[in-house]
Image (spheres, rainbow, N blue to C red):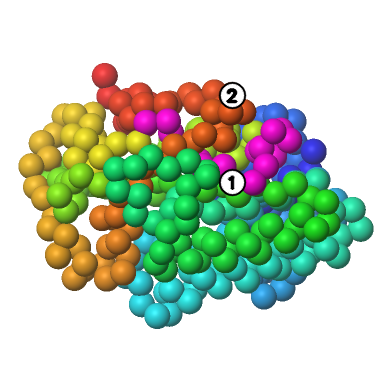
Amino acid sequence: MNIGITGATGLIGRRVASLARSHGHDVIGFTHNRDRVSPGWRFFCDNQSPDVDGCDAILNLAGENVVGRWTARKKEAIRASRVQGTRGIVEAIRKAKTPPRVLVNGSATGIYGDTGDTPADETGAHGTGFLADVCEAWEREALAARDMGTRVVLLRTGIVLARDGGALAAMLPVFKLGLGGTLGDGRQWMSWIHIDDEAALALAAIERSAYDGPVNATAPEPARNADFTKALARALRRPALFRVPAAALRAAAGGFAAELLESRRITPAAAAKAAFPFKFPTLDAALRDLLGAR
């Protein structure tokens, strides 16, 4: 199978590309860098339809990083990179001589908003707020590919744990110094997934027709922020005695602080129904693997 991947140089894209090749697939990367265009690489930008001819599947992971203070310019980049970029992908599918059989489109658990203590699976109601609105518009663009007979999977990813990037890599320097701690009151739920399970689930969604529509890319056991903090400190054998007050987070991070303080207790019902074999279903197992803890 020829698999086209936007965001192929990112944390998740690199891991999926490597796994796909190990399964015998060919990978075509889509890049914003014109100088990189070469055999195996094609140009892609937010306001131009790429060439998807010859792709049996598309994995669309492109999008501005949501981490950082949400200025007006940052929020527009987050929205445009997802909504306009996906619109271009779907337009390319429409123009293709032979449309790809499947589009696995990135999304996020942010679509559910703040779920409090209530577990939410793929049937859960959509939330409110900036990121929920972006995710809803993002998914709406992707679903238009069904008009061309393309199966569409909406990969709603939680917090991806990886040693070489993402949230965990950002936390490690602080926690290694013994300066880690809870965010706000620490009661908010965090829905996480090990990078290997994220990549395997994304590829399974491409390979297997059992996946269709929303798929939560989260481990079966979400954790409260306080419990996540304790588990990470335990894995690193460091104390984590500090607490970052919610007000301080909001002052420092603006609108992005909601992503750190809202509760998302998300469960992967679609993956469970498809009998996806999570390699790291528990937080302690994931951290042991990533950090070499014993």
Is 27 positioned to the left or the right of 98 in the image?
left
- Occupied quadrant, residue 114: bottom left
Q: Residue furthest toward the right?
A: 97
Within 10 Å of disc 1 (Cα), the crowding (few <14, some 14-19, many 20+) is many
Query: Is residue 43 something one can see in this rendering?
Result: no
Q: Closer to the camera, 23 or 131?
A: 131
- Indicate the secondary structure of the residue bearing disc 2: loop
Type of the residue with mark 2: Ala
- Give the x, y percent position of residue 289: 37, 26
Residue 283 or residue 220, whichever sits in front: 220
Q: Residue furthest left?
A: 241
Left or right, residue 16 beside residue 24: left
Quadrant of the rendered structure where residue 230 is?
top left
Question: Mark 2 — residue?
Answer: 275
Numbered disc total: 2
Residue beneath the point at 27% across and 62% down: 257
Q: Position of residue 156 (x, y in %)?
A: 52, 48
Quarter of the image where the C terminus is located: top left
Which numbered tag is attached to residue 214? 1
Tell me, yes or no, whether the highlighted magenta stretch contains residue 211: yes
Measured as percent of width and height from the top left, residue 251 is found at 19, 70
Q: Earlier in the sequence, mark 2 or mark 1?
A: 1
Q: CA distance from mark 2 to mark 1?
A: 16 Å
Q: Which residues are magenta?
A: 205-221
